Amino acid sequence: MAFVERQNQPPIQLNKETVQMPIKDIIWHKVSMSGEFLNDKNIILDNQIVQEKAGFLIYTPFKILDSNKIILINRGWYPLSKSRNDVPNIPPIKEIQTIEGEISKMPSPGISLGKVITEKLDESSFRLQKMEYQVLSSLISKDLMSYVVKLKKPIFDKTYVLDSSMPVPDSDKNYGYAFQWFAMAFTLLIIFIRLGVKKK
């Protein structure tokens, strides 16, 4: 599997040149990079389940040193509090940082039945139900890369759980989407039949 092979290779130093590499050439590679976090545009990806517990993933944009390119950094998973109205405390990460992680595809939005709604929770946090590149690039920057980086170890976020999920092959995703559409069509059929029976 390419994932295992690339995980065993030395980290790629991401800079203004290597960040331009096609995603097919860099996906799943371990990377090291220097730059600064943009703490005013934290992304909270809602409805993320870990060990049967509901929570969310936290992403913070990271600007590559000496470059305009920006990458979303997956800082980890955090459990939901008792109220959805509670705004997560996301500590800002200041000054130039050098971080390590691995390149990952942006989480797939799956079946989309409507416009992605962006909830502004406070001056620096936005909650989304799914990741959609066009929405994120409009919110953050036109220089946002289409992939993300998963951290290998927490950065000031000692209570977060690192997202260690394995990549899902595209074929498995396609089967998953097909199953979702089939299940939706089956549900609509049952509703249609029940309504027809009631009318009679």
Image (cartoon, rainbow, N blue to C red):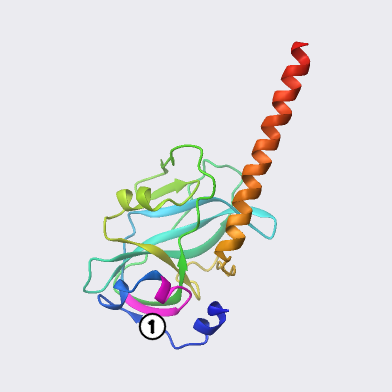
Identified by mark 1, the residue type is Ile
Magenta span contains residue 30: yes
Query: Which residue occupies 45% across, 75% down?
Result: 101
53 is higher (above) or lower (below) than 189: below
Quick one: label 1, few (<14), some, or many (20+) residues within 10 Å? some
Left or right of 19 on screen, residue 114: right
Question: Residue 56 at what x, y percent from top left?
Answer: 54, 54
Question: Which residue has dot 1 on it?
Answer: 12
Q: Which quarter shows the C terminus?
A: top right
Query: Which residue occupies 62% across, 43% down?
Result: 181
From where the camera sits, is residue 124 visible?
Answer: no
Query: Which residue occupies 63% across, 54% down?
Result: 176
How many labels, in total? 1
98 is higher (above) or lower (below) than 150: below
Magenta span contains residue 107: no
Magenta range is 24-34
From where the camera sits, is residue 13 visible?
Answer: yes
Q: Nearer the viewer, residue 176 or 149?
A: 176
Question: Residue 184 at what x, y percent from top left?
Answer: 65, 38
Question: Residue 24 at what x, y percent from top left?
Answer: 42, 72
Left or right of 2 on screen, residue 50: right
Query: Which residue occupies 66% across, 43% down?
Result: 182
- Local SS, label 1: strand
Place residue 71 in its image quadrant.
bottom left
